[in-house]
Amino acid sequence: MPGTHVKAQMIFVPSILAFGVIVAAYVNLGAKLATLRHDGVLKRIRTTPLPAGAYLSGVVGSTAATTLAITACTAVIGWLAFGAAPRAAGLAEIAGGLVLGVVCFGSLGLALSSVARSAESASPIANASYLPVAIMSGIFDPTFSVPRWLSAAVGLLPVRALAQILQQGYTPVEHAPLTDLLVLFCWAAGGCALAAWRFRWH
């Protein structure tokens, strides 16, 4: 990175890990549940002996497992192709960030599925809500700069927080990881509350 001794791939690889978590846990889960609702699957599930909560837990659990599998594959590719490996001392930060990130963006995906009025609108809404933030957060280009006030606002959103936690696990960077964890926790709590309030089966 310009002006530092940190190699670009040590920032880029964990940023892509964060991007994978967001796409799998937020975009895909939200779109999938919106589609299941639109097709009447969720409504029919409630007429079967299978507890509705068990079905929903299975969908969420499957998404979490898929997200972690994608993350593991991306991390291995980053190591083999770019030589970017996490610090041994940073593995706990990465594990904690991934778990909290999956919970955070998974809950936001549940909330998204309730906001989307149709299956067709779920993906556009999701992409429009996170892609601009991801760009301004430096997910795709760590050197991308925005005005200071905008950077401060983006710092309160979970996209940059997750990316910085994972970056901290690869190489020490100048930010406050505890603050990032707090941001993720607050968004996870808010997402769970919104999902519990707005989630619809039909």
Image: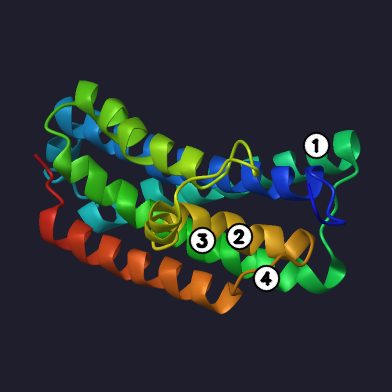
Q: Mark 1 sits on what residue?
A: 77
| Horizontal side, residue 115 vs residue 11: left or right | left
* Helix, strand or loop under label 3: helix
* Helix, strand or loop under label 4: helix
Q: Depth check: 144 or 159 in front?
A: 144
Image location (x, y in percent) of residue 28: 40, 35
Q: Is residue 36 above or below residue 163?
A: above
What is the number of the mark on residue 161? 3
Image location (x, y in percent) of residue 196: 18, 62
At horizontal 67% and vertical 70% (from top left) the residue drawn is 93
Type of the residue with mark 4: Glu
Residue count near mark 2 (Cα–Cα under 10 Å), binned few <14, some 14–19, many ≥20: many
Q: Mark 4 sits on what residue?
A: 93
Mark 2 or mark 1, which has the lower sequence index?
Answer: 1
The quarter of the displayed image where residue 177 is located? bottom right
Residue count near mark 3 (Cα–Cα under 10 Å), binned few <14, some 14–19, many ≥20: many
Q: Mark 2 sits on what residue?
A: 164
Q: Depth check: 130 or 28 in front?
A: 130
For residue 24, say whether it is visible: no
Mark 2 or mark 4, which has the lower sequence index?
Answer: 4
Marks 3 and 2 in Cβ contact (< 8 Å): yes
Image location (x, y in percent) of residue 98: 58, 60
